[in-house]
Amino acid sequence: MVPGLEKILLKVQKPGRYVGGELNSVIKDKDAVDIRFAFCFPDIYEVGMSHLGMKILYSCLNRMEGVWCERVFAPWTDMEALMRERDIPLYALESGDPVKDFDIIGFTLQYELSYSNVLNMLDLAGVPLLASERRGLSQLVVAGGPCACNPEPLADFVDLFFLGEGEEMDCELVELYRAHKKKGSSREEFLREAAHIPGVYVPSLYEVKYGEDGTIASVTPHSGAPKKVTKRLMLQMDQSFFPKSFVVPYLEIVHDRAVAEVFRGCIRGCRFCQAGFLYRPLREKSVETVNRQCRSLCETTGYDEISLSSLSTSDYSKLNSLLDELLTWTKEEKTGISLPSLRVDNFSTEVMDKISSVRRSGLTFAPEAGTQRLRDVINKNVTEEELMKTVTTAFSGGWSSVKLYFMIGLPTETLDDVAGIAALGQKVVDAFYANPNKKKGKGVSVTLSASGFVPKAFTPFQWEPQDTIEMLHEKQRHLVSSVTTRKIICNYHDADTSFMEAVFARGDRRLGPVLLEAHRLGCKFDGWNDYFSLARWRQAFEACGVSPEFYANRRRSFDEILPWDHLDYGVSKEFFRRECEKAYAASTTPNCREKCSACGAACFQGGICYENR
Ligand code: SF4
C-alpha cells in the first residue's frame, strides 16, 4: 500500500479507482525483473480500463520475461488535490511504486483533449515535463495510439512515439532498452538506435523550420534518423497476440464487458474518418479465433456480455457464421452479444434475430449527414432508403428506440443540410407509426446526436478549415429549431471543445509551449465539459503569441508541408488529394471489397488488398 493512501481513500469519490488488486492484474517480484513499464492512460480509471488497446499491450508486455508492466490512470481532481497536499506522487496500481522510479513511462493517446492530462500526470509523478530536461536512461517517456499520427504538439515532452500497432514494436523497443540499460548507454545513444526500429519516431532527431507565413518550411532528420517513419501493423490477425484474460475492475467502468476484436482496418473510406485510414488495410480474424478468444475471456473474467469490436462490425465477412458459433454456448450460458458498430446498409434481420435471441440493447446508426448530397461528399455510401429499410426492420423486430449520429460543420455543408438531419429524424418517427408490425402500446424515441466536424491528419479533409465556433453555434440552433416533434431528442457536442480538438489534431511543435502554459494555468480533463475552459486555453495561446485559429480555421493548400508529412501510414497524400477533389464533386468511391482504389495501403502486402487479387 502506498504510504499515506489509506488515510485519504475515505475522503475521495470511488476509492476503488486507486487501490489495484483486481482479478487478473499482474503481480511480479520486482527484484526479479529488470524493466519496469508504467502504462499510463491519461484519463480516469473507468475510461482507461475500458480501452482494448491497453488490455492487449498490458498482457503482451507482461508476457515478456523480466518485464513488469503496470497500470496508471489520471486521478480525479479530488484525489489529485489530496495527493498533492500530502506529497503522494503518482503511483502504479499493481505495486504502488512511484511512476518516477520506472524505466519506461508509456502513454496511450486516444484523443487530443487528453494532452493536458499527460502533462499533469508527469507533473504529479515528479517527472520533468520536458524531454530535454530528463537525464539518463530511466523515465523514458513514450507514447502511441491514434493521436501519435500527428505527435508534433507533444514533441517537446515525449522521447519517442510508436506509429501504428504496438504488439511487436513495443516489445522490440523494450528489448533494445534492456540491452542499452545493461551496457549503460546514454539516453541519446539509445534514442538514436531506437529510431531504427520500424514504426518508432524520435522527434528530437528532426529539425523543423518555419516560413514567414507561419507554415512549415522544412523537416530535416539528423543523426541518421530515417527520412520517413512508416507505421507498424500486424498482418496475420489470427497469429497476433490477444489476451486470454482482462483485469476485472471492482467498480463499474464505461465498457464493463468482455471485448473481442473481429478485425482491424475498414473497407469504407468515409472521408472524415481518421481511424478508417490509419488502420488500413482491413485484416480479419477467423471465426474460430474470435470464438476461442470470446470463450476464454468469459471463462477468466466471469463477464456475461461480449462486445464484438471493430470500426464497423457488420462489415465482418463471416458475421453470420461467427454469431452461429457464439450462440452454441452463449445462449446456454445467458451471455449477451453486442455489436457496437452497425452500418445502416448491411444490417440484416438475420443478424438482428441472432443478437435479440439473447439480449436486446438499443440500436445506434451513424448516417453522419442529413442529405444525400452531403453523404456523397463524405463518402458515407448510405442512402435514405437503406436507413428507412433498416429502421423499419428494427421496429418490426420490437425495437422502439433508435439513436442516430451526425456531424455538423462538414465541408460544403449548408443550412439545408443541417435541416435535413431533423427531416431524416422525422422520417424515422413516421416510419415507426406507419409500421403495422411495431410493438403494441409503445411510442418511439429517436435521438439525433450531432458532433462538430474536426478535420484530422491522414484524411482527405486534412486541408479543410473547421467551421468557426460561431458558425457551429448557428448550425446547432438551426438543427434544434428544425425539430418539430417531442418524439425526437436532439443533442449536440460543445463547439468549444471541437475547436480545441481541431487545433491539436493538426498542430505543430509551436503548440508545445502553449500546452506547458495551459498546464501551468490548471488545464486538465479537457475532455470533460465541467473542466474544459476555453477562456483558460485562450489565455495560454495569448501568452505564447500563438493563434489557435491558424490551426483550426485555416484552409491549407495542397502543396503545404503538413506537420505529419514525414510520417507514413501507408495511404498516400496523392490519394487523399484525389478523394478531397472527389468530395467537392460529391462523387463517391467504392469500398475496398467492391474495388481497390489504389490508396497505397497495399504497400504492406497483406489484408484485403491482397485477398482481393
Ligand atoms: S489498397 Fe485498395 S484494397 Fe487496399 S486498403 Fe487501399 S483501397 Fe482498400
Image: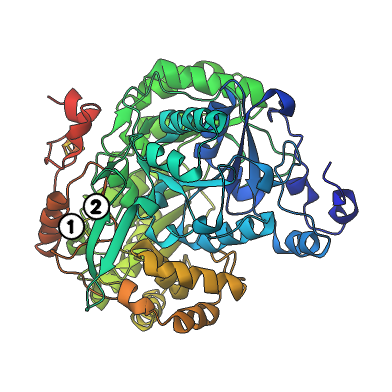
Question: Marks 1 and 2, Cα distance to the nearest angstrom?
Answer: 6 Å
Q: Which residue is mark 1?
A: 376
Question: Does 316 sit left or right of 515 as displayed?
Answer: left
Q: Which mark is residue 380?
A: 2
Asked if marks 1 and 2 touch (Cβ < 8 Å), the reply is: yes
Query: Considering the image in quadrants, where does the N terminus appear?
Result: top right
Residue type at tag 1:
Asp
Using the rendered view, name the quadrant where residue 453 is placed: bottom left
Q: Secondary structure at mark 2?
A: loop
Q: Quadrant of ligand 1?
A: top left
Q: Residue 400, image x and y in percent?
A: 48, 51
Q: Residues within 10 Å of mark 2 (few under 14, many from 20)?
A: many
Q: Residue at x 55, y 19 (%)?
A: 295
Using the rendered view, name the quadrant where residue 85 is placed: bottom right
Q: Secondary structure at mark 1?
A: helix
Q: Residue 504, image x and y in percent?
A: 40, 65
Question: Does 204 sit left or right of 242 as displayed?
Answer: left
Query: Considering the image in quadrants, where does the C terminus appear?
Result: top left
Q: Residue 449, image x and y in percent?
A: 43, 63
Q: Residue at x 47, y 51 (%)?
A: 110
User: Can you see residue 544?
Assistant: yes
Q: Residue at x 34, y 78 (%)?
A: 549
Front one among 613 and 230: 230
Residue type at tag 2:
Lys
Q: Residue 542, image x and y in percent?
A: 45, 84
Front one among 490 and 101: 101
